[in-house]
Amino acid sequence: MDYSYPLLCASERYPHDIALIGRDEVVTYAELEQRISRVAGGLAALGLAGRTVGLLMDNRPEAVEALMALSRAGSVAVPLNPRLTSAELEYIAEDCDLEAVIAADDYLHVAQGFARVRTVVSLRADAGTDHSMAALRTADPVSVDNSSSAGDDAPATITYTSGTTGRPKGVIRSHRANVWNVVNSALGSPRRRGEEELFNLPVFGIGFLHFLLPALLGGTAVVLDGAFAADRVWRLLHDRAVTRTFLAPTMIARMLAQEGHEKFDCSSLHTIQTAYAMTPEARLAAVERFGDVFEYMYGLTEAQLTCASPDTFVREQGNVGRTMGVSRIAVLGPDGTRLGADEVGQIAFSGPSVMSGYHGLPEETAAVLADGWVLTGDLGRLSADGELHYQGRSKEMIKTGGFSVDPTEVENTLSAICGVAAAAVVGVPDDHWGEAVVAFLVGDGASVDVQAVLARCREQLAGFKTPKAAFVVSALPENATGKIDRARLRALAVERYR
């Protein structure tokens, strides 16, 4: 079966229920399934079954339709981040041998600029391309039973990592892995029929599998409103009485900084899922505004999620909960042996939802896939009752003067100092220390006294943890999922640090 199967099941259970809510249209489950099957037939007629096809779209109903149709047609979908530069997108297109692209109007010029791409599919028939999704919707339908998918273990998607530490890698996921990902997420955080979930993460990321498809499997209507904008999210939460959403810490910070947000009623929200680094102060502010409704999560493109219950969000800062559904987690020592309760080691995932490997990178694949386990490169510990406590990313640990420094610890200390709204810490090469701790600071409105901040930091942290230099920036660079882009910060730190 291809990985559109969970959505087919939902369409048979809830044919007349609303599945997708866009800015300009509302689509029922039955309508969505009909569109998927016909577009899949059209893609197959174009000879794209088994071919690598990119998707260039923001969050909109057609993006779901296109990705599911590519799955049904047996194509290998490569969701592309429209925010990347032309050079970055061309790298990905070359890396995965992209042959066709389905693009929204705003990105047609980008798709048409790819050197090797022969086929560009637009949304509208009058967009100036040879093919359009509007035309493909008139093709003979393809059902799951006669899908041209090569099999459960055939590649379904190549999702490129965000590249926070270097060149992005294409994560190959099979149809089987994607189906299990959806089912596991639905089991770990069940949805309710008739409710509405606002999908804020981009459709070109792993959030499509972690959140959007599990919502549809459970009968929840998904609101797709383009790229995240704090003012629009407040309005949607209020006007539509949204019951569930995902908000990255950076999204929460922007929303709480929005003037007059207090007037918006968010009492319908019973679940907000979040992830990534978050200071204690930011957690308290979030709970004060939204209530104790936060499910703190941990996961990655290569493997499944863990999820903690809301009551741990403020009380246990590093608790990211238990694995979801049919998935296992372990904490491993340097020699690969499983560690005991509360021993810190590398987090590893196992189960049917993990990736097949990295596209064209056999050595990197072998380095992270070991005996059925995906090695995450992250540090954590498992409590006696099976809850995972995240301890930081081992690759981001800074080695300075023979000591290891966790950037999160330094960032939390800096962010708590008066005058600092946000902070990020990276390591840069240093002839004396090996690596030097360098900080980037965002002020809370007034100018930041860097020397005063560093002096305050020395009072609270050991000397080797205190930044050797700090620079004030207007904002911390982020990738599309709201994570701090440490690769860009490192490059900036190398330029500025002497």
Image (cartoon, helix red, strand yellow):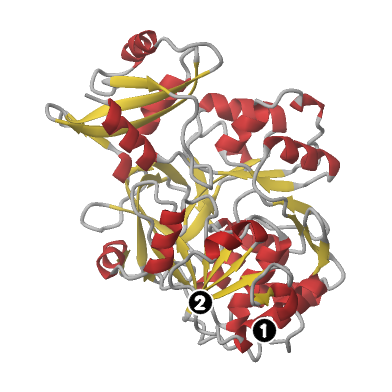
- Residue on which disc 1 sits: 42
Q: Nearer the viewer, residue 349 or 21?
A: 21
Q: Is residue 97 visible?
A: yes
Q: Residue furthest right?
A: 16
Task: Confirm or deny contact between disc 2 and disc 1 (CB under 8 A).
Answer: no
Against 337, residue 309 (above or below) is: above
Q: Nearer the viewer, residue 59 or 331?
A: 59
Circle 2 SS class: loop
Identify which amino acid the numbered label 1 is placed on: Gly
Identify which amino acid the numbered label 2 is placed on: Arg
Image-based side of 44 in relation to 431, left or right:
right
Is tag 2's residue or tag 1's residue first in the polypeptide sequence? 1
Against 450, residue 81 (above or below) is: below
Query: Residue 470: image x %, image y %?
Result: 34, 20
**Residue drawn at 51 percent across, 82 percent down:** 152
Q: Residues within 10 Å of mark 1 (few under 14, many from 20)?
A: many
Q: Quadrant of residue 426?
A: top left
**Residue drawn at 78 percent across, 36 percent down:** 266
Against 278, residue 77 (above or below) is: below
Q: Residues within 10 Å of mark 2 (few under 14, many from 20)?
A: few
Q: Quadrant of the N terminus?
A: bottom right
Query: Residue 239: image x %, image y %?
Result: 85, 41
Query: Residue 283: image x %, image y %?
Result: 58, 30
**Residue drawn at 28 percent across, 27 percent down:** 437
- Residue on which disc 2 sits: 118
Q: Residue furthest bottom?
A: 146
Q: Quadrant of residue 70?
A: bottom right
